[in-house]
Amino acid sequence: MREITNFRDLGGVKTQDGRVVKTGLLYRSCYLGWMNEDELEHLKQIGIHTVFDLRTSYEAYESPDPIMDGIKLYRVSGMRDRNGEGVDFSPYGIHKMIIDDQSSPTVLHEHMHQLYRDMMFRNESFMFLLELLKDMDNFPLLFHCATGKDRTGALAILIYQLLGVSIEDMMHDYLQSNVAYHDRIQQALEKHHDEIRLNPSLKQRIVMEAGVDEAMGKEMIDGILKQYSSYDEFFLKEYGIDTNRKEEIRNQLLTKV
């Protein structure tokens, strides 16, 4: 796989209870239209059974995933606004949001931070994924958004939190998108070099369009413990996952070292 596909296995990461996330079950990537024939063939070779698309209906209509025999395709928007409408958080969508919003840069910045924080709570795509996890016939499963970094990154954080992965390892996975999109980020920074020199605060916005912003990732994680005393309370009240259900999922997706 080319780095630009932002494809990786969530497995191989150690959890805080000493187990390891199983490999070959959960994968993340960009939308499949960015993949060439060899990369799509690789998905078949590793046995992907299910593709879960986190984009809006408009995004999926404009750039549909290729249909592949024997692979089930589901779609639930991974980010919604206060009205419950799916938010296009592709690089194009972020750029359009910035252009269309007539608010001050500070107001727009806070709005985007709030969208990130809100992805952790009552996220319909995560609820749907929890249903998919109940059926082993859905594995291996690949989930993606447009570039596989924002909405996909948020869902990966929720999965890792549920499995007991450390915050450091969650953030390491989240920031791997900047490795995949290193060239694109550098090109964007070079293109806007003069603007950034005059207004250094623009750098975060430009990095966020082309890659991911570390501060945003930390806010998604920290925002949970600002509202709840523990992750256990968070998962119970937001997603109905009690101790027994959590252990079922962990036993399903974790293995001993």
Image: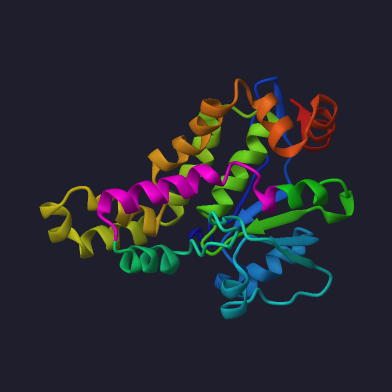
Determine if residue 182 is in view: yes
Furthest residue toward front: 83
Residue in view at x 58 percent, y 70 percent? 35
| Closest to the observer, 106 or 235 | 106
Asked if residue 50 lies left or right of residue 198, the reply is right
Image position, residue 93 (x, y; %): 44, 67
Q: Over which residues does the magenta segment extend?
A: 103-126
Left or right of 141? Residue 200 is: left
Residue at 51% x, 61% y: name it: 147
Vertical arrangement, residue 82 with respect to residue 42, above or below:
above
Q: Position of residue 84 (x, y in %)?
A: 60, 58
Secondary structure predominantly adopted by residues drawn in magenta = helix
**Above/below status of 229 relative to 203:** above
Residue 59: percent from left, percent from top: 56, 72
Rendered image quadrant of residue 72: bottom right
Number of numbered markers = 0
Q: In the drawing, does residue 134 fall left or right of residue 23?
A: right
Q: Is residue 25 visible?
A: no
- Work out which quarter of the rendered image holds the C terminus and state it: top right
Q: Quadrant of the N terminus?
A: bottom right
Query: Residue 47, position in %: x, y?
Result: 79, 59
Of residues 61 and 14, the one drawn nearer to the viewer in this rendering: 61
Frontmost residue, 5 versus 53: 53
- Looking at the rendering, which quadrant does residue 191 occupy? bottom left
For residue 108, side relative to residue 249 (left or right): left
